[in-house]
Image (spheres, helix red, strand yellow):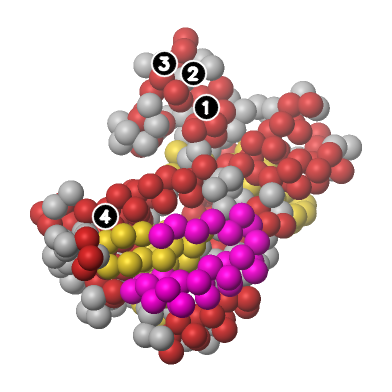
Amino acid sequence: MNRRFFAVLIVFCLSVGCGKVETTAPEPVDKEDDAIQIGMIFDTFVVERWQNDRDIFVSHAKELGAQVDVQNANGDAQSQVDHMEYFIKKGVDVIVIVPIESKALLESIKKAKEANIPVISYDRLVVNGETDLYISFDNEKVGNLMGEMIRKELNAFSSVYMISGPKSDNNVSMVNLGFQNQLENSTIHIRDIFYTEGWKSEFAYDYMQEQKEELTQIQGIMCGNDSIAGQVIRALSEQQLAGTVFVVGQDADLDACQRIVEGTQSMTVYKPYEELASIAAEAAVTLAKGEELQIEDTIMDGTYHIPYIKIEPIAVTVDNMNEIIIDSGFHLKEDVYLNRPDLMP
């Protein structure tokens, strides 16, 4: 990866409205001893997409001469606090975090600021944290795409469930808002909203089991991510309803793309993680070098307006699976059509 790549990446970011970053790519650092130190804290690696984000971020940061120390909190908010304290004592140049619970992190973020260590909210916003940057997808648009698809495909007076992620994740409220806005003036009825604590998809399955007597009255289900969608479809299958209920999710996980081809999941939302992770790595290096990112977009984190880079999501159905997922190299054709090779183009 070289400077020309990142210059092109920034131009692309400007064209799609990714926060209008005006800085150029930082110069690679040749000496390992001079390498910028980035501390990166994830929520969990149980969810497929976080593994992809990690690998892309670390690779691009390395190309820029930075070293990344990755920590996994395994879904535990206190572990993230401990990781923050560790990175502050270690004296890293910048911290990038996928927050589990914002409130738990506020004191640690304050300590990082006192130590002159910039903090980046990655994908999820640290509410009231006054982080130096929030980089994510347009999460309200993610919900818009889900709601738009539900509204387009379902008949009037249909009933739907919303099976979301946890309330503690600020992205959930943004996605839900986008979804509900799409249905606001329609006759489609949101029968119930369930929040999946800790993004544990098995809770979605349990919820579906509790509702199994009513499932024949449900025409659509909005799922907070594709892992949740998988458990929802598992429960529908047990009631011989898979493929008859319109199920939408997000993340474009491989198994979700397989389900779309098979006809049990109706759509997912593809979020170009390579773009997100690449731009985040560049921003982290720039901030670590004490340089300022010139970003016009901001977001209110609850108390403060902070710089905001947002990247456009894309709705994926069986009709554009090849164009969006396969042609981009996100998943291999053979993998997507693994269970239905007869449908492979």
The quarter in which the C terminus is drawn is: top left
Identify the residue at horizontal 18%, vertical 57% (top origin). Answer: 6
Q: Nearer the viewer, mark 3 or mark 4?
A: 4
Identify the residue at horizontal 45%, vertical 82% (top origin). Answer: 112
Identify the residue at horizontal 52%, vertical 27% (top origin). Answer: 258
- Disc 2 from disc 3: Cα separation: 9 Å
Residue 93 seen by the camera: yes
Given contact means CB atoms under 8 Å apart, are the residues at marks 1 and 3 in contact?
Answer: no
Task: Classify mark 2: helix, strand or loop.
Answer: loop
Type of residue at label 4?
Lys
Q: Which of marks 4 and 1 is in front?
A: 4
User: Which quadrant of the structure image shows residue 181?
Assistant: bottom right
- What residue would you read off at disc 4? 62
Q: Which of marks 3 and 4 is nearer the N terminus?
A: 4
**Circle 1 crowding by C-alpha within 10 Å: few under 14, some 14–19, many from 20:** many
Identify the residue at horizontal 76%, vertical 33% (top origin). Answer: 235
- What residue would you read off at disc 3? 344
Given contact means CB atoms under 8 Å apart, are the residues at marks 1 and 2 in contact?
Answer: yes
User: Which quadrant of the structure image shows residue 72?
Assistant: bottom right
Q: Nearer the viewer, mark 2 or mark 3?
A: 2
Counting from the top left corner in percent of width and height, residue 266 is at: 56, 34
- Disc 3 from disc 4: Cα separation: 37 Å
**Circle 2 crowding by C-alpha within 10 Å: few under 14, some 14–19, many from 20:** some
